[in-house]
Image: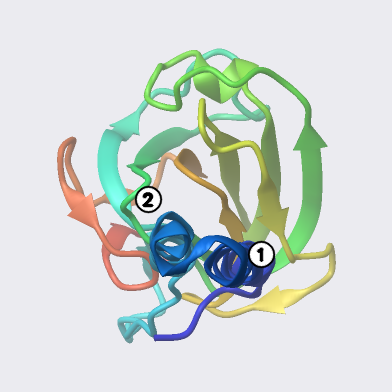
Amino acid sequence: MPFDRAGWPFILAALVLAASAGWWFGRAWSIPFLILVAFFAFFFRDPDRTVPGDPRLVVAPADGRVMVAGGAPQEGAPAGKWQVITIFLSPLDVHVNRTPVDAVVTRVAYHPGSFLPAYKAEAGALNEWTEIWFERAGQPIVCRQIVGILARRIVCRLTPGQTVQRGERFGIMKFGSRIDLFLPLSAQVRVKVGDRVVGGETPLAVMER
């Protein structure tokens, strides 16, 4: 199983601590740090995904559970008229993020903020987030990576002007978080609240063109 490169410092640091504890104090002392190694390896896992073929499909940008499906955006949403799909990621979900559409990146913005639990509605406006604007067939789509009470670090590897393909890896959120996806009103939402989705695979919506 491959790992996202953001996880290697955590995995290697835990391995060093395990080896040091075992060398100085005995093997039993290394066990807690080996458990930590296993946790970091599990959290930063980066499995391959099979992207659906229809280019009109919007695929899930992350693994998790759907909290909002096609609802009106809360206060603090990007300017414009949108419907929103919100995905909550627990610490047990794969946290590698994937691009939802074939598009060009037009803007990447960082917003400092609080660290409220990501499942709270107001977290989308008040918490720290990174926002990526995509343009697909002349229509904007916005993906917002939002930290939670545990997630304190967002990694986004996209830059304005970059062309991306659906399901392409673009970043990771560390230790529990949320993604808000803002879609045009013309998009047909295919998921409902409570659904489990798989990043890069599950169709969330269908674009009109």
The percent position of residue 34, horizontal first and vertical second, equals: 43, 65
Q: Is residue 85 left or right of residue 177?
A: left
**Residue at image mark 1:** 13
Q: Quadrant of residue 54?
A: bottom left
For discs 1 and 2, the disc positioned in front in the rendered view: 1
Foreground pick, 134 / 16:
16
Identity, as a three-letter code, of the amino acid under mark 2: Ala
Tag of residue 166:
none
**Is residue 137 visible to the viewer in this orientation of the structure?**
no
Identity, as a three-letter code, of the amino acid under mark 1: Ala
**Residue at image mark 2:** 187
The local secondary structure at tag 1 comes to: helix
**Is residue 155 visible to the viewer in this orientation of the structure?**
yes
Q: What residue is drawn where x is 42% and y is 35%?
A: 84
Mark 1 and mark 2: span between their CA atoms? 45 Å
Q: What residue is drawn where x is 42% and y is 16%?
A: 121
Q: Quadrant of residue 24?
A: bottom right
